[in-house]
Amino acid sequence: MKLTVKEVKEIFKPKLLPIIWRDETNTLTILDQSLLPFQTVYVDLKDVETTASAIKNMQVRGAPAIGITAGYGMVLALRNDRIQNLNDALKELTRAKSILDSARPTAINLAWATSRMLNFAKNAIENGEAKSLNELIHLMKIEAKRIFDEEYEAEILMGLYGLEKINNGDTILTQCNAGGLATGTGLGTALAPVKLAKALGIDVSVIAPETRPWLQGSRLTVYELMAEGIKVTLITDTAVGLVMYKGMVNGVMVGADRILRDGHVFNKIGTFKEAVIAHELGVPFYVLAPTSSFDLKSDVTDIKIEERDPNEVRTIKGIPIAPENVNVYNPVFDVTPPKYITAIITEKGIIYPPFNENVKKIVER
């Protein structure tokens, strides 16, 4: 069944709304993902500092959701008494971009969104569209909403392309959380085909590794899929090899925080392991990400992999699980070489190897 984006919007109605812009109060409201699944708490973000803090502290997480949040964070930067004119506005937006970009350096959507918003503001002022601060704020809100809308439509298209790789009765292994919580829309990237399959009456289930140390798999993916009525089984991170070896998985679908022009994929730690095991056992391994997650300029050695607080590994929710002074290496992401990837699914189409030739053709289409 070949559906249009409009038809999918009629069929699929997200159960979760992780990001809400409140125009009447110029407030960005986010679902605090650090408290899920035990507490459902929405937090209001009213300036660039609180927005950056929410990103850094993983109250909002997932590359696309971070990008959407940062876009609105640039709007919030203009709600500032220090700004007296349009020149002040550009200075404040430049400062805001620096603050936001430093919150989570590996996810390319963050800098992509802040750059887009800053350039939009510059162009709006230069071409005379924004003659006052209020006009600039109005246009910036429209642009931030456009980022959200483009992301949602991209996820629908990824979901439709990904549906081509799912058969009735399939079980999909994922990693971390690449659903609507991670994108801010309620649909997702890697989970988009699964959710659309469910909406169309296709029998599909998911195996979700817990994803230490933040447990995005057990806290978020399981929570999200159960809310959508999708069958899901939680496993430990160390059980990935066995479930694939036993033939319990028909395919792997993961998201991405950054994809390079040669097909190297930066995603949540544990993705590389899944890809290698899938390759060895002949299980298809798919990466799903919008073209905003592609970095066509950098080489694999250029990318800084974020490392986080060692206590995230030493403890769970503040409860010690290891000696307090043990040395810890806590990288948030790993890098998966292109040889282990079956295909990369984007809103513009499915990219097959050789990636060093085909990535640019699709992304710049």
Image (tube, rainbow, N blue to C red):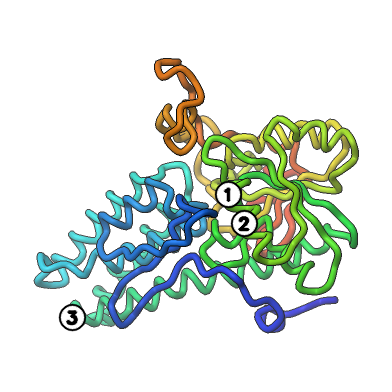
Left or right of 33, for residue 87: left
Q: Relative to 194, does residue 251 appear above or below in the rendering?
A: above
Q: Going 69% across and 35% down the picture, which residue do you hit?
A: 236
> Of helix, strand and loop, which one carries label 3?
loop
Q: Amino acid at mark 1?
A: Arg
Identify the amino acid type marked 2. Answer: Tyr
**Place of residue 155 in the rendered image (x, y in percent of width and height, measured from the top left):** 63, 66
Check disc 3 and give the amino acid type. Answer: Ser
Drawn side of residue 357 relative to residue 59, left or right: right
Q: Quadrant of the N terminus?
A: bottom right
Residue drawn where x is 47% and y is 61% of the image: 40
The C terminus sits in image quarter: bottom right
Question: Label 3 neighbourhood size at 10 Å, few (<14), some (14-19), many (20+)?
Answer: some
User: Which of the two residues, 71 or 202, is positioned nearer the viewer here?
Assistant: 202
Please say whether residue 339 is visible from this viewpoint: no
Q: Label 2: which residue? A: 223
Query: Which badge, 2 or 3, is on the more N-terminal residue?
Result: 3
Q: Which mark is residue 148?
A: none
Give the quarter of the image for residue 224: bottom right
- The image's mark for residue 132 is 3
Q: How far from the left and from the top, in percent, is residue 215?
A: 57, 42
Residue 219, numbered label: 1
Q: Nearer the viewer, residue 83 or 246?
A: 246
Q: Residue 292: x and y, percent?
A: 53, 58
Real-space Cα separation, disc 2 to disc 3, in angstroms: 45 Å
